[in-house]
Image (cartoon, rainbow, N blue to C red):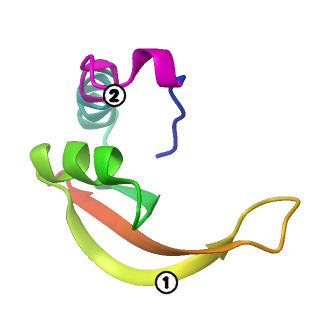
Amino acid sequence: LGYAIHKDYWRQGYATEMIKALIDFCHRNGARKITAPVAQENAGSNAVLKKLNFYIEKEGSFKKRGTDIVYAEYTYRLDLT
């Protein structure tokens, strides 16, 4: 799972609504799990995923595309079984 929302639309429930729809879609189509990598410093996305019952499966890091900037990362997981 990956998404980006323009700053003008943060904190309006769009991420929650979008992820809920994706969870429903995945349930209907037989998926067993959803994973979502998120920068640890991204408080909004971390809060949304926790609110929707995702849990941290592992920690790691990633390099921002086109730069040498490295971010600490959580990979969240939601089991659909």
Toward the right, the furthest residue is 66
Residue plotted at (28% across, 54% down): 46
Q: Using the image, determine if residue 57 lies above or below residue 3.
A: below
Name the residue beneath numbered marker 2.
Answer: 15
Q: Nearer the viewer, residue 31 or 54?
A: 54
Examine the rendered structure and indicate whether residue 68 appears above or below residue 18: below
The residue shown at (29%, 76%) is 57
- Main SS of residues in magenta: helix
Tell whether position 61 is magenta: no
Q: Who's the residue at 26% across and 35% down the image?
A: 23
* 24 up-or-down from 2: above or below: above
Q: Extreme front residue here?
A: 8
Residue depicted at x 23% and y 28%: 20
Task: State the CA–CA distance, disc 1 to disc 2.
Answer: 23 Å
Boundaries of the magenta span: 7-17
Q: Dot 1 corresponds to which residue?
A: 60
